[in-house]
Structure formats: structure tokens, C-alpha cells
Image: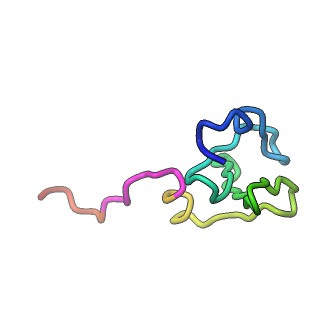
């Protein structure tokens, strides 16, 4: 599965029925609203509620591709 796969447009989170994102091809589908990750096994998304796992704040940031949080410094 790739980010431009047409199937990704019709797949939905089994809990909130909202869209899912694919942060890395073939890795897992992710619902950033609920912070739940659903694995892809042998090319098949596992979209049962029990298959999803809650991710940490750090993992959430990584999955969204956000830059690391500032270390609190205000200048160079």
C-alpha cells in the first residue's frame, strides 16, 4: 500500500469512521484524531478495533512527520 493507493481514500477508522493516513508505505495506517495505529500485515490493513494500538506523544509526532519540539531555547 502506498500513499497514492486509491484504497486509502475509502478506508476509515473502525472507531470514529474518519479518514486514515499512511505515514510510511506498507507500515501502518494511522488515525491522528484518536492517536491509533492499525498494522498492515502482508499488504492487508488490520482495521478491527482490537487491532489498533494507542501511540505515545513522541510516536504521534513522528507519524505526522512534525519536526522535533523546540528544546526551550529562544535564540541561536
- Residue 52 pos. (x, y %): 78, 61
- Residue 41 pos. (x, y %): 76, 62
Give the colour scheme shown: rainbow
As drawn, is 63 to the left or to the right of 39? left
32 or 22: nearer the viewer:
22
Q: Quadrant of the C terminus?
A: bottom left
As drawn, is 74 to the left or to the right of 5? left
Number of residue marks: 0
Task: Identify which residue is drawn at 87% across, 56% down.
Answer: 48
Q: Is residue 17 above or below residue 39?
A: above
Q: Is residue 65 magenta?
A: yes
- Magenta range is 63-70
As drawn, is 44 to the left or to the right of 37? right
Q: Is residue 71 above or below residue 34?
A: below
14 or 11: nearer the viewer:
11
68 or 47: nearer the viewer:
47
Task: Identify which residue is drawn at 79% across, 54% down.
Answer: 44
Farthest front residue in view: 42
- Residue 49 pos. (x, y %): 86, 57
Q: Is residue 9 magenta?
A: no
Q: Is residue 31 above or below residue 60?
A: above
- Residue 46 pos. (x, y %): 81, 57
Task: Identify which residue is drawn at 37% across, 54% down.
Answer: 67
Q: Quadrant of residue 57 in the image?
A: bottom right
Amino acid at each position: 500500500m502506498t500513499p497514492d493507493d486509491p484504497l486509502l481514500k475509502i478506508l476509515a477508522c473502525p472507531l470514529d469512521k474518519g479518514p486514515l493516513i499512511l505515514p510510511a508505505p506498507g507500515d501502518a495506517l494511522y488515525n491522528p484524531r484518536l492517536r491509533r495505529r492499525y498494522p498492515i500485515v502482508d499488504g492487508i490493513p488490520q482495521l478491527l478495533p482490537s487491532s489498533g494500538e494507542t501511540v505515545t506523544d513522541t510516536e504521534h509526532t513522528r507519524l505526522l512527520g512534525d519536526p522535533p519540539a523546540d528544546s526551550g531555547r529562544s535564540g541561536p
